[in-house]
Each structure stands twice: as C-alpha cells, then as structure tokens.
Image (cartoon, rainbow, N blue to C red):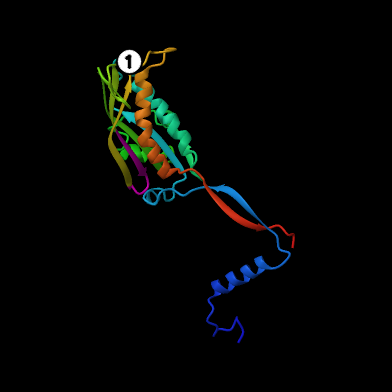
Amino acid sequence: MSLLSPHCRWPARALIALLLLAAGCAPGVATRKVEFAAPAPPDPALRPFLEGVSRLGVMCVTTIKPFRELDTEKVIARLSSGLSRSLANIPGTTVISQDEITWQLKEVVLDSAEVVTAATRAAMVEVMKLDALVLVELSHVEARTTPMTPTPYGLAASPGLDLAVGLKVSLLNLHTNKAWQQAGQHRDWKPVQVQLFGEDQGERQLLLALSRPLELFLAKIAPPPRRQERWFEVSGN
C-alpha cells in the first residue's frame, strides 16, 4: 500500500516530519544552528485591547501640584518621555508622544479628569488618528522625613525620606472603548543624601518609585525580544 494512499493511517503532518527527519540524517547534509532575537508578543491579558492598533498615544497626568522642592510636573514630563521610548519596541506600532498630542489638541483640556471623556477620546481618534492610549495617572504623593533609616543591620540614627505614591496605568482601545487597568500604592524609603550638582533627591526618588510598576506594565505590553534557534542546511544542495 502506498504511503500516499487514502487508506494510509499515517497523518500528513507525521509523514512530512518523517521525510524532513530522513533528509536531515542523510549523509552529506550539513546544518548550522542560528540564534536570533525575535519580537515577543504582548501578554495575553493585553492582546484584546491591542487588536487593530497601529497608532498608540501616551499620556501622563496628575492632579498634584508641585510642592516644597518636588516638581511633579517635571517628573511627569520625564516619565512620559521614557514611556514613549520604551513603547516604541512594539512591532508595527507608531507611538505618539504626549507633546505631540498636546500640541495637536490645543483646544482640548487634557487633565486627569477630562482625558478619558467621550469628547476627548473622539478628538484623539478624529484629529490624531489614534487607535489606543496608554494613560498613566499619578493620584497621590506623600513625602516625609524620618529620623531613622532602615539598614541591613537594623535601624540607623540618620534621616531618611519615606515616599508613598498612588499610580494607575490604563490601556484604552479608543475604537472599542475597552479598558485594561492596574492601580496600587508604592513606597520608597532612602536615606537623605547631600545634594550635588543641583540634583534633587525627591524627584529622583519619585521617578524610581514610579518606574517599578511601569516596568511591570512594559514587560506585558512591550516585552523584550526572545532568543530563538533555527537549524539551516548549509551543504549547498
């Protein structure tokens, strides 16, 4: 009975696999393993919100005004810039920065209360041609100086800066109005350091506290490339 007979019990895929195996084991066939970095797909939980998305906007907003020596507006601007660069790793997606959205939508209020309204979403679709929006909202910042600082050996009698922040990250599909969100409170505690070269410890510490939850989000929506291996025939036959 022929292997190609309709009565053959071998499935077509198994037959092809056997033929390829036999070809690879044949004498005179040389192969070489090639390693390369392939784009990694987003987390399955986020894929429904990224369907049909080719233009992705980024917005970082806060209701907190600058206080003491903590310039929250500068921190938000730096956060938006870094987030836009990281999201550019998504294959086939154009990332639209917050500066461009603000400039194009001059007549639209883009604060934390208005950025998610139906009118604002419609303007983003009609004017900016956006398909989805990554929205980061800083809703709470509490900074206090403590007389003691934790160390690996216990508490040390040196002042520390205890920083608590409330952050919500949303992925909004502007066509389907589906939204994915993660929110939580995050803390960072560091010893008070001498300020050098005009740098502000509060701003650096705030960026660090915000970067940790955002790294988890970026690992889901724009994971780093994965190493893959393929075998290629190099015998020239």
- x, y (%) of residue 32? 66, 55
Q: Which residue: 44% across, 50% down?
A: 52
Say whether residue 165 is visible. Answer: yes
- x, y (%) of residue 17? 58, 69
Residue nearest the viewer, comparing 94 with 187 = 187
Q: Which residue: 36% across, 16% down?
A: 193
Label 1 environment density (alpha carbons within 10 Å; few <14, some 14–19, many ≥20)? few
**Number of numbered discs:** 1
* Stretch in magenta: 167-178
**The image quarter in which residue 111 lies:** top left
SS of the residue under disc 1: loop
Q: Quadrant of the C terminus?
A: bottom right
Q: Quadrant of the N terminus?
A: bottom right
Residue nearest the viewer, comparing 53 with 21 = 21
The residue positioned farthest toward the front in the image shown: 153
Residue behind mark 1: 69
- x, y (%) of residue 122? 36, 40
The residue positioned farthest toward the bottom in the image shown: 1
